[in-house]
Amino acid sequence: MQKVSWLITPENVVVNYEGQTHTLSRFDAYSSKLIEALKAKDWTLLPDLISQAKRIETFSQGKFQVRDGEIMVEGVKAPEIIGRKIQEFVREGLPYEPLVKFAKNLQCNPSARALGELYQFLEKNNHPITENGHFIAYKKVRPNFMDIHSGTFDNSVGTLVSMSRSSVDDNPHQTCSHGLHVANWDYAANHFGSSSDIMLEVEVDPADVVAIPVDYNQSKMRVCQYRVLGVVDKELSTPLRIVKKVEPACPVKEEPKEEQSCEDCGVSDAEDISVERDYTENAILCESCCLEREENREDEDEDEDEDEDDGF
């Protein structure tokens, strides 16, 4: 049995195990488990608690591996942003499956340039990942949920807003151009729209990112598709966002009509007889009585026309 020694400070837990020294921050979610294992002298738990590589492999059930300091996702080297997300999920004890999906969705983006820009965007803004392997972004729209610029795109909750990828300008140096726009919280909240507009939380597939304009410091992007999740009033801070199934907004149901009766003959619309409003006389009449009143008015008008003068 290898000798184990350790030192616990307010900042770190330092463990010497099998001839190697490991340091774990007290802010790490695993630090309390490590301290418990040390006090209980349960050395079998130490490898999973002190070795980051072992923790990552155990956490992902072998889907992620660490080779020469590089994190691999199913044998493919993970971008730096994925590596940091993996470490964050490990520390928080979150499920690994969303990260596998996220990595695969990234690989489905047909533009290597857009992918490189997206890495920078996600690294700078730290957007939450969804269980579908998508990420959360924000968008401000008019009070009626139509887009601010054109007023033609419906952004009601649950709506999948999309356009042809070929219709989205993929030139990052063209800062304002064709495409669907989403952004980080700061840009959407403070640099666009007015105080009467509403903020939306949207879900974006990494494969649908087309361009990230260069002059906005990775704060907004053009995409070809996103789904509206809901109205929000603050930025999300959790690394994983569990998205509940969102149904499109239901149309407003019409209130049942009040039964009406003809004021002349008494028949009602419940008897499957059309009841109309005669706005000339402000009366509710059935079709036959309405026609009868019109005929009477026409007769009276003919009599009056014989003596009428238009005054010119």
Image (spheres, rainbow, N blue to C red):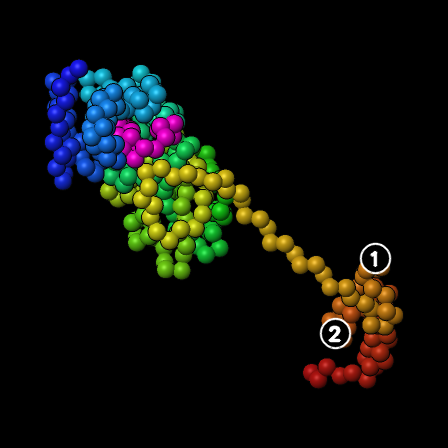
Query: In screen coordinates, is 102 left or right of 303?
Result: left
Residue type beneath disc 2: Asn
Q: Which residue is mark 1?
A: 272
Principal secondary structure, stretch drawn in magenta: helix
Relative to 276, is 254 above or below? above
Q: Tell me the CA gap for discs 1 and 2.
A: 22 Å
Q: Quadrant of residue 299?
A: bottom right
- Tell me the residue at 40%/56% (across/down): 197
Where, quadrant-wise, is the C terminus in this rendering? Answer: bottom right
Label 2 packing within 10 angstroms: few (<14), some (14-19), many (20+) = few
Location of residue 176 in the rendering, given as x and y in whole percent from the top left corner: 33, 44
- Tell me the residue at 54%/48% (across/down): 249
Which residues are the magenta region? Answer: 79-99
Q: Which residue is mark 2?
A: 282
- Tell me the residue at 75%/83% (across/down): 309
| Nearer to me, 18 or 279 | 18
